[in-house]
Image: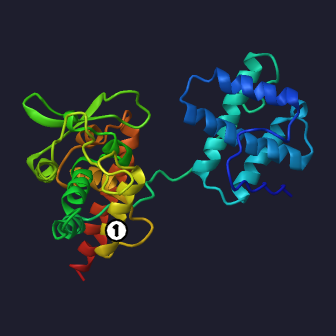
Amino acid sequence: MTASLVTIETPVLSFPVVSQKTAEIVDRYISSLDVKENSKELYRRTLRQYFLYLETKGLPLNNISRVDILQYKDCLLSSGKSPLTVGSYLTSLRKFYEWTEAEKIYPNIAKGIKTPARKKQFRKQPLRPEEATALIGHFELRKEEGLRDLAIVNLLLRTGLRTIEVVRANVEDIVYKGGKRVLLVHGKGRDEKDSFVVLTDKAFKPIEDYLHSREGVKGKDPLFCSYSNQNSGKVLTTRTVSKIAKEGLTAIGLSERVFTAHSLRHTAIVNCRRAGGTSEQAQMLARHSSPVTTQIYDEFFREEERIKNSGEDLIDTLY
């Protein structure tokens, strides 16, 4: 019988349940990581869950076996955490023990511990073309903040940008490459704006109308700014962009949890394939570093085509 995981309601970055020596080891490990600060905090939080588990089992860190790691994995899965979440916890452990072995502190008992298998699919549902049209239509009818919100939602649907990429965009990021208008993109996990999306006329027109409605716009200004009293004229938050998208989705009848702002990114990628685009074109649109990631969308597209043109329907034409 596995031990229950301790519920952590707020992230605490210290390690009150371990010895000072162990805490120092963890601090040394975290300091050695060549990653961003938010990634360091993630490693620290997931490791803290591991140490809480060891405490409930009464296991000292210097006497852990591979079996204990496997039991911890089972405990994570039985607690209801998704395979994706469990995988992130195990990744932290594998990296931690790789480091402790290299530093000749503890052997790498986590080596070869497998990440739980999960079905390769995206959890947010893309919109059908008629639903995307309805969503754009909803924002076209709105007044006041409508120009901004229409420009944002239309951009998400036509380029597959992430919400973080939308809020990072400045007016000066609209430039020309090879005779085409593009928007430079500061992507997730990137240090600079090293990518871009093409702004077709349909993608750019609402942005142009919105920018004309703002007075004294400068190149350094955020492409989309806040209307709130406290942050008027300043950069939007990803939460605001998500709220805008969700409000529109709910208004057209797509209120389920599978429909969010990220659904609009999925919609753009799937619609590229629906419109006859190749898998390579979809990959470039999505800015995926690996074609394996784009294959998830290919599978969705094939499944959709399977339903639309099923062999079962053909059989029914015969008898």
| Left or right of 167, for residue 23 | right
Q: Which residue is mark 1?
A: 247
Corner quadrant of residue 87:
top right
Q: Amino acid at mark 1?
A: Glu
Whether residue 116 is visible: no
Q: Along the horizontal axis of the image, is 251 left or right of 207?
A: right
Q: Which quarter of the rendering shows the N terminus?
A: bottom right
Figure colour scheme: rainbow
The percent coordinates of residue 239 (x first, y second) are 42, 55
Comparing 136 with 114, the one in front is 136
Above or below, 188 against 308 in this view is above
Q: Horizontal and vertical percent for residue 283?
A: 30, 40
Q: Which picture quadrant has residue 80? A: bottom right
Residue drawn 40% across and 42% down? 293
Callout 1: 10 Å neighbours few (<14), some, many (20+)? some
Q: Residue furthest bottom?
A: 319
Q: Quadrant of the C terminus?
A: bottom left
Helix, strand or loop under label 1: helix
Q: Position of residue 129 (x, y in %)?
A: 21, 64
Residue closer to the observer: 284 or 277: 284
**Where is residue 214 shown, x and y percent of the image?**
17, 49
Nearer to the camera, 125 or 302? 125
For the point 33% across and 53% down, the residue is 266
Question: In which quarter of the view is residue 174 placed?
Answer: top left
- Describe residue 209's horizontal placement relative to residue 239 as left or right: left
Task: Inspect this view and state whether residue 317 appears.
Answer: yes
